[in-house]
Image (tube, rainbow, N blue to C red):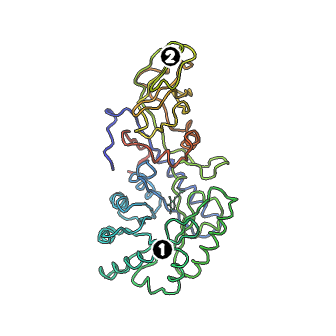
Amino acid sequence: MPPFPPAHLADAVLTVDLDAVAANWRYLRDLGRVAGRPVDCAAVLKADGYGLGAQPIAQRLFAEGCRHFFVAHADEGVALREAVPEAWICVLNGLPPGADADFVALGLVPALNDLGQVSAWRSAAQRYAQPLDAVVHLDTGMNRLGLAAEEAALLVNDRMRLRGLRLALLMSHLVSAEKPADPINRQQLERFRTFVSRMPGAPASLANSSGVFLGADFHFDLMRPGAALYGINPTPGAANPMRQAATLSARILQVRQIDAMSGVGYNHDWRSARPSRIAVVAAGYADGYMRVLGNRGEVVIDNHLARVVGRVSMDLLTVDVTDLPEASVRPGAFAELIGPHQTPDQIAEKAHTNGYEVLTSLGNRYHRAYVGAAP
Ligand SMILES: *Cc1c(COP(=O)(O)O)cnc(C)c1O
């Protein structure tokens, strides 16, 4: 884990509610049980658990019964192995050249994204004289990572290419799962089903967070949610069934009174229409509070909403607190930048992005507090 500052040296605190993450995981897992088939639920922890801390989250979810974890980079897999020695860990970006010894030693499973990786991993199995788990990733429409249709056909017709490997999972990834009406969902489902039926005996996985909500057809044997675990709405446009897991609070450093028609911050990008009180808050774009939120963002101070005014600077932002009770806004008090009242999805809308980017942009100058950590 990166060296996050201790509480007494930090101007901001990121609180991660592991009980909420666990509740979200159980909720998704139970959705996979509605059809009466045993469907497992994994957890996707790439980008350090979407910015919230892969290690404590994995430990808590493992204690809940989660056994399958996905990361993007090999290095993330190495870090995660320390936290959950018994778990099954898949590296989605595949096997980097020269990394097979690490993968074998740590029991990391590469997603094999082309036939070259299939044969490299098979050679490793021969070299280390042991059967190795493999994940075969089929591209069913994303045109990003995964075996293209022609490569998949070669594999289906020549299963010897997998000799020495234990086919642990067939997987594919959905293009538009958060848009249930998009016809690409069904097309991918059909392509994936065909592939799975031609590779009998191997478990299969298709659904990301939003895919879980497309119905039991999409569940297969293992669901792979990421975002929803952390509170991002997997069903945009409908009520969010997930619990918020992240609260980001930053200290108010100073509160100042300014006259009417005074400019605030770089380029005086905002001017007061009336005599105003401005709170200076200790977080900025270097901490992932996006610069585009200048004059757009909102923060919560003592249950009152207050608008970000002027530019967001590297380490600071300025907030109009003129209408807030004076007792609520004092130096040393905290302003909530992300939380139940300002969810990652709400911030994303103002910042023209998605909740994923809001969370994964979180910087490393925050003290991290984990609520509900596994013993
Ligand atoms: C990121 C990712 C997931 C998880 O997606 P969410 O939308 O965050 O649930 C699942 N599978 C793959 C291949 C991914 O890259």
Give the residue drawn at x 32%, y 39%.
Answer: 5
Which quadrant holds residue 124? bottom left
- Few, some or many C-alpha atoms within 10 Å of disc 1 (few <14, some 14-19, many ≥20)? many
Q: Which x, y percent locates residue 74?
A: 36, 63
The three-letter amino acid code for the residue at tag 1 is Val
Mark 2 crowdedness (10 Å alpha carbons): few <14, some 14-19, many ≥20: some
Callout 2, which amino acid? Ser
SS at badge 1: strand
Tell me if residue 75 comes above or below residue 172 in the rendering: above
The residue identified by callout 2 is: 262
Image spot of residue 207 (x, y percent): 57, 63
Q: Are marks 1 and 2 in contact (CB under 8 Å)?
A: no
Q: Nearer the viewer, residue 184 or 340?
A: 184
Residue in the foreground of this view, choosing between 288 and 205:
288
In the image, 319: left or right of 97? Answer: right
Between marks 1 and 2 in the image, the one whose residue lies nearer the viewer: 2
Residue 187: % across, % down: 65, 69
Could you tell me how far apart the alpha carbons at marks 1 and 2 are, in whole angstroms? 61 Å
Pointer 1: what residue?
A: 136
- Picture layout, residue 209 above or below residue 146: above
Rendered location of residue 30, percent (x, y): 59, 60
Sooner in the amino-acid sequence: mark 1 or mark 2: 1
Is 126 or 119 nearer to us in this picture? 119
Q: In this view, does 31 lie above or below 230?
A: below
How many numbered tags mark residues here? 2
On the image, which quarter does residue 348 sit in? Answer: top right
Give SS at disc 2: loop
Q: Which residue is drawn at 61% across and 74% down?
A: 191
Q: Residue at x 43, y 79 (%)?
A: 166
User: 246 or 171: which is nearer to us?
Assistant: 171
